[in-house]
Amino acid sequence: MDSEFVRHKVKHTEKRYIAMFRIMFFSLILGVVLGAVGGVFYLAINYVTYLRFENNWIIFFLPVTAVVILWFYHILHGDNDRGTNLVLLSIQSDENVPLRMSALIFVSTVMSHLVGASVGREGAALQIGGAVGNFCGRFLKISVNEKKVLTMIGMTAMFSALFGTPMAAAFFPLEVVSVGIMHYGALMPCVIASFVARGVAKYIGAEAPFFDIGIIPDFDLISALKIAGLAALCGLVSIVFCLALRYGEVLAKKYLSNRYIRALILGTAVLGLTLLVGNQSYNGAGVHYINNCIDGVVEPMGFLIKIVFTVLSIVAGYRGGEIVPTFFIGASFGCLFGNIIGWEPALCAAVGMGTVFCGVTNCPVTSLLICLELFGFSGAAYFLLACAIAYMFSGYYGLYTSQKIVYSKFKSNFIDKKVQ
């Protein structure tokens, strides 16, 4: 009896380790493949952005490009595409993510950046990586749980390759699906895929960003109170951004029910606002504007203008995601806060980036790691305090309607509700 029990335990352990090494192997393969895809995607986005800045007339194609993107999705049966929300649902409830999503979002995001739509690129990365990982799980006919892990591995690999923050990328899929719990079973393969993908992307030419925010002041009571106030306000700014996106989409569909007319009108609105502003500071991802914020230079209403540009672009049908615009909004608001109170605008811009991202994604651990990787570890105490406060003050709002709040942010209660 005892020997039979031992044999059973040994066999069970062998199966567990075989499954573990199999997932590790898949994470290596996906890390290499998606690292290469992410590197090419990075170079493509940079190239079309350069073309736009060198040829200002390209922005006049904003309205027609929105229509072309919608038509592109239509002919490839993507009219009801749910983007990153579908990827999250595939992890929550085993929905399939069509592989064609990766091609659709790749091409349409490059097109959106070429003409100057106010969109990001990391949302596209999550969709490409999630679609490839989900397809691999279906192709290999592995278990449902392993397929979900592959989807998270794909998300991690593309995020790391494109944005250059491997630590944050490894934790983001574990944290974003279900707020309040972490999918630690996918931690090791996600870490492996993240570092492999970053290495491959770096070899191809995808640079990792780093912002020098100078000398960090000592962390004392007064400084902590200043950062706490900024973080609380950033949590509220994140709510404004999420609500603007949500109600912008509702109103646009109500009064502009034809998607092609909606795309044409809102694309024209983005073009008109660009001409009214007189420059392209609010078009595209806006990384150059973030650099200005780190240097302490900001337009007083910059964060609100970027919200308007981004809402119009997303609702019009341009693709790419909202994450980098979120960094733009956070950096500009943080810098403005620092200038108003006369204290460390570079640090405030950095905190603003991390906390608005935290508010819209409900991912405090990922937000902290992004801050550490983008700005260094000398401001770790400020970043930790700020992310914790923003997480609380952002409430139950978020960018992704499929995201679930499993445990309350305010008590240790199981609530299992979707974000507002």
Image (cartoon, rainbow, N blue to C red):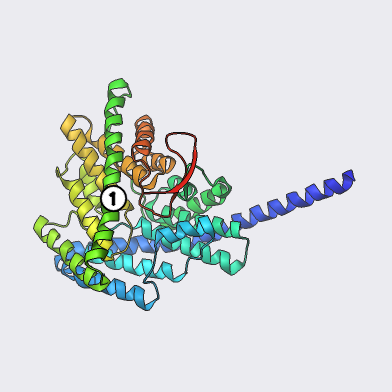
Who's the residue at 37% across and 56% down the image? 122
Q: Is residue 92 above or below residue 214?
A: below
Measuring from the top left, give residue 282's x and y in whole percent: 19, 54
Q: Secondary structure at mark 1?
A: helix
Kindly indicate the quadrant of the structure image that contains residue 106.
Answer: bottom left
How many marks on residues?
A: 1
Q: Looking at the image, which residue sits at the far front? A: 254
Kindly indicate the quadrant of the structure image that contains residue 337.
Answer: top left
Measuring from the top left, give residue 63's x and y in whole percent: 19, 70
Q: Is residue 287 above or below residue 336?
A: below
Image side of residue 237 versus residue 23, left or right: left
Who's the residue at 62% across and 67% down the image? 141
Kindly indicate the quadrant of the structure image that contains residue 138.
Answer: bottom right
Measuring from the top left, give residue 400's x and y in whole percent: 38, 53
Residue 393 visible: yes
Residue pointed to by mark 1: 243
Measuring from the top left, give residue 259's x and y in whole percent: 27, 71
Residue 212 visible: no
Q: Of the residues shown, which amino acid type is indicated by label 1?
A: Leu
